[in-house]
Image (spheres, rainbow, N blue to C red):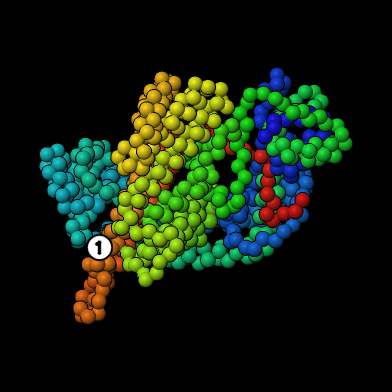
Amino acid sequence: MQKIRIISLEKDKVNVIAALHAIGAIDLRKSKLELGDDRPGQHAVELSDALIKVNGALQLLVQHRIGREKSLTPEALLAEVNGMSVLAKIYDLGNERKSISDDNRALDYAGSVAGAFQGIGIDFGRLKSNYLSYKAFEADRKAIHALKRSSRNANETGLETYISDMGKGRFLVLMAYSKQKNIDAMLKGIQLNELDLGAKYLDATPEAVLQNVGKRKAENLKRLHQIGMELAEISKRHYSRLANLREMLEIELARADVSSTFKRTESTFIIEGWIQKRQLDEVRQRMSKVTSGRVEIEEIQGDELAPTYTRRPGFLKPFDYLVSFYSVQRSDEIDPTWIFILSFPIFYGLMVTDVGYGIASFIIATLITLKYKDPDGLLFNAARIWQLNAIAAIFFGVLSNQFFGFQLPYSAPFHFDWLKNTPELIAITVLFGVAQVILGLFFGMINAYHHGHRKLAVAKFTSVLVVACGTVAVAGAFFGAFDAMTTEITGVVSIISLLLTGVLSGSEATEITNLITHPLSYARIMGFGLASVIIAFLIDMSFTPNLNDGILLFVLYAAIFVVLHLLNMLLSMFEGIVQGVRLNFVEFFSKFYIGNGIPYRPFSYKRVYTND
């Protein structure tokens, strides 16, 4: 990445911004030069207002197929939007629909209150008095007892209370009292649901109100249907054009607003930002062309941290998304994502390790990607990673001959048996941990050296010796994997390296115990994988349905068989995902990863419906 500064004349600014936007190569930054700040383009406010207007209209319409159209200049764009009478029609229909929806809520409430008073012989229109106030409540039996008790204790006079049993433990309470009287203290603490007797449409007897409510709701329903038909007709004629206008407005507004990141003098403007070096020549050529050579482009040197740019195939981009949840990688440190891409599916595959469970994982993940299609969403990206992990689970299921706990009569290359090869699997998973921890420490040594932390870089190197030599010493001493001399030498080297690591690490000295515990932590891969296999084996041994046992036992055992395998499968999937992520983020990344980087976000756009 290279930081550059572009200096050009004020009269060329519109053309320069449009060209930079089209190239989509510069991540713009506010310049630190002691100059005046530039301001947004003259059309920024008008474009923003127009975009809000068009967006609001599109929200009210029915989506239709969108055709491609040629883009307009900002002036022509604003003129068209401001001159579209159909926008006012859309908003009028939308406001009317909202008004009717509000009216329906008022009708529903009036209907519910009138229904509660039906048959009591009351007229809501006569409850409006200059001398008396009325309150109505719904209450349960406990609240009624509390109300009666409170009324007796208060010794209220001039208060009339009517209570009607509504059934199912609910009661209706109507209270009439003098306007000068305050009964709030008497009602305090009692669980009563007050009914609004002054609500809209409560102006006659309950029966008349219910009749009026039914009539009005039928009229509203008819009008809502008409509004829907009118909006559908407008959508057919105008949705495509409005969608095109929205895209044009978004692009032009971005161009108008971007000037706020520039600096300016009386006759020039200054742009600064980061660009990939391979695109620098293209930017020089385009800037020279649109300004007729009235431009200067400088390469700026400094110690400012460059933004992080990642370039990976599309199907691997979800791994970048997941790593960014941990922290965005700095541009001056080693990219750990490739190791994560390789190790995570292996960890998941070994912990799930069943063809049937792997196929189920793939199906579930695929269904999630079909339902949640947002490429920037968590669920979509997690499901894409899950699909790759599921393939790994199928692969290891084939190697270990596991099909929902059953074994088929075949022998695959590199075949292994979870029950017979347990010691070897423990050793393999621990050695996997040793290798990944050593790699992480090695990356940490390189990062520390590049950042000028020489002492810490040496400490990372001695940490590598601790893990590598310690592994050889333990393997030789306890398992006879190496001769006595090799064991003794590596043991001494690991102890000396451990002491040096503690001295050189400074504030990180408290982490030296992790040099022992983190490699061993990878044994959980074998533990969860073996547990899944054993549970599946026990389910098959105990509950595999057999027609010879009779139809009832067959159905019962089949149900238990499916449910237990489903639970074991879900547990295996959960542990495979959680533990696979943990081993990478905690045991591996903690050895070297700094993070807190700045993602590379160039000033760019993507036309979907319109053409330049």
Q: Position of residue 602 (x, y in %)?
A: 66, 39
Instruction: Compare residues 335 and 276 and report the one nearer the observer.
Output: 335
Instruction: Compare residues 149 and 410 and report the one nearer the observer.
Output: 410
- Is 220 situated above or below 271? below
Instruction: Compare residues 271 and 188 and report the one nearer the observer.
Output: 271
Where disc 1 sits, the SS reads: helix
Would residue 449 appear left or right of 145 to someone viewing this image?
A: right
Residue at 16 percent across and 52 percent down: it is 141
Residue at 22 percent across and 55 percent down: it is 172
User: In the rendered image, which quarter is residue 560 located in?
Assistant: bottom left
- Is 206 situated above or below 587? below
Would residue 160 appear left or right of 431 to someone viewing this image?
A: left
Report whether residue 459 is seen. yes
Residue at 25 percent across and 79 percent down: it is 547
Residue at 42 percent across and 55 percent down: it is 349
Instruction: Compare residues 191 and 603 and report the one nearer the observer.
Output: 603
Q: Position of residue 394 (x, y in %)?
A: 43, 61
Report whether residue 521 is seen. no
Q: Which residue is mark 1?
A: 538
* Residue type of the residue flagged with mark 1: Leu
Q: Quadrant of the N terminus?
A: top right
